[in-house]
Image (cartoon, grey):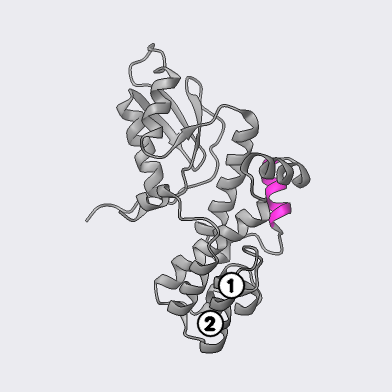
């Protein structure tokens, strides 16, 4: 049996002397970090540390330069990742990493109490939330609020697939006051399939499996290819 992968974190401490920080897009799970580490090592780099949005690296052979950016970009792109050079995009990726860390990898009893996402992100990133929200929408074509809801839906689907938690339990874990509050979130503009699924689940109350169908009907975006790295 293979060893369990470590729980990913959103941020790295300040880079150690002699290392270079690479900002990388699309790393969202433990398997993502393992694959990215493998690709960087195969490119001739030693990975000092890696998190959901960045990796600190240095050449395996002391005194050698880093491989060309084009080489690293090609290696990472082949497995669904991308180097990020623009500081604005780096900030967006850090924002996404914090959301993913909080929703997917922070136990409910360890999550900050009575803290809104806006305050949490602003505090962690040292930026005004209005600026973070505007930048996120501008660079991603998606509001930060919708991104947070999307991550909650993905986490709800994951928790319910275990068949060990009720819809009410999942709703509480994700910070909703009730199952109804979770199902009433403005995930996407109303459309017939979503409305029909909501009515069907409300009427039948079929439990977790039915609720997963409801969540799938609301999915505005397909599951990222990177996510499949964690299950295949």
Q: Is residue 220 above or below residue 49?
A: below
Q: Is residue 112 above or below residue 205?
A: above
Left or right placement of residue 91 versus residue 56 in this view: right
Q: Whole-percent x and y of residue 154?
A: 50, 61
17 or 116, nearer to the observer: 116
Q: Whole-percent x and y of residue 157?
A: 47, 67
Q: Whole-percent x and y of residue 109?
A: 57, 66
94 or 221, nearer to the observer: 221
Say which element carries label 2: helix
Residue beneath label 2, please? 201
Q: Quadrant of residue 182?
A: bottom right
Residue at 73% in and 53% down: 119
Left or right placement of residue 54 versus residue 142 in this view: left
143 or 11, nearer to the observer: 143
Q: Whole-percent x and y of residue 2?
A: 25, 52
Discs 1/2, front: 1
User: Over which residues does the magenta segment extend?
Assistant: 117-125
Q: Is residue 119 magenta?
A: yes
Residue at 47% in and 19% down: 18
Residue at 56% in and 70% down: 173
Q: Is residue 202 magenta?
A: no
Q: Quadrant of the N terminus?
A: bottom left
Residue beneath label 1, please? 192
Q: Is residue 161 above or below residue 207?
A: above
Earlier in the chain: of badge 1 and badge 2, it is 1
The prevailing secondary structure element of the residues shown in magenta is helix
């Amino acid at each position: 049996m293979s060893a369990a992968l470590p729980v990913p974190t959103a941020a790295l401490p300040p880079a150690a002397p002699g290392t270079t920080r690479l900002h990388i897009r699309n790393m969202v799970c433990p398997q993502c970090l393992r694959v990215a580490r493998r690709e960087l090592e195969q490119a001739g780099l030693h990975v000092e540390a890696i998190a959901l949005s960045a990796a600190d690296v240095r050449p395996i052979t002391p005194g050698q330069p880093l491989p060309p950016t084009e080489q690293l970009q090609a290696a990472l792109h082949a497995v669904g990742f991308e180097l990020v050079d623009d500081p604005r995009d780096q900030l967006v990726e850090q924002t996404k990493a914090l959301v993913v860390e909080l929703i997917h990898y922070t136990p409910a009893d360890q999550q900050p109490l009575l803290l809104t996402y806006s305050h949490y992100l602003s505090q962690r990133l040292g930026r005004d939330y209005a600026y973070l929200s505007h930048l996120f929408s501008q660079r991603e074509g998606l509001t930060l609020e919708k991104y947070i809801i999307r991550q909650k839906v993905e986490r709800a689907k994951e928790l319910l697939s275990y068949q060990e938690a009720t819809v009410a339990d999942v709703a509480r874990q994700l910070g909703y006051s009730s199952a109804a509050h979770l199902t009433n979130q403005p995930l996407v503009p109303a459309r017939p399939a979503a409305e029909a699924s909501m009515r069907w689940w409300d009427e039948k109350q079929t439990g977790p499996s039915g609720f997963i169908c409801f969540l799938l009907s609301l999915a505005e975006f397909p599951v990222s290819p990177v996510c499949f790295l964690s299950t295949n």
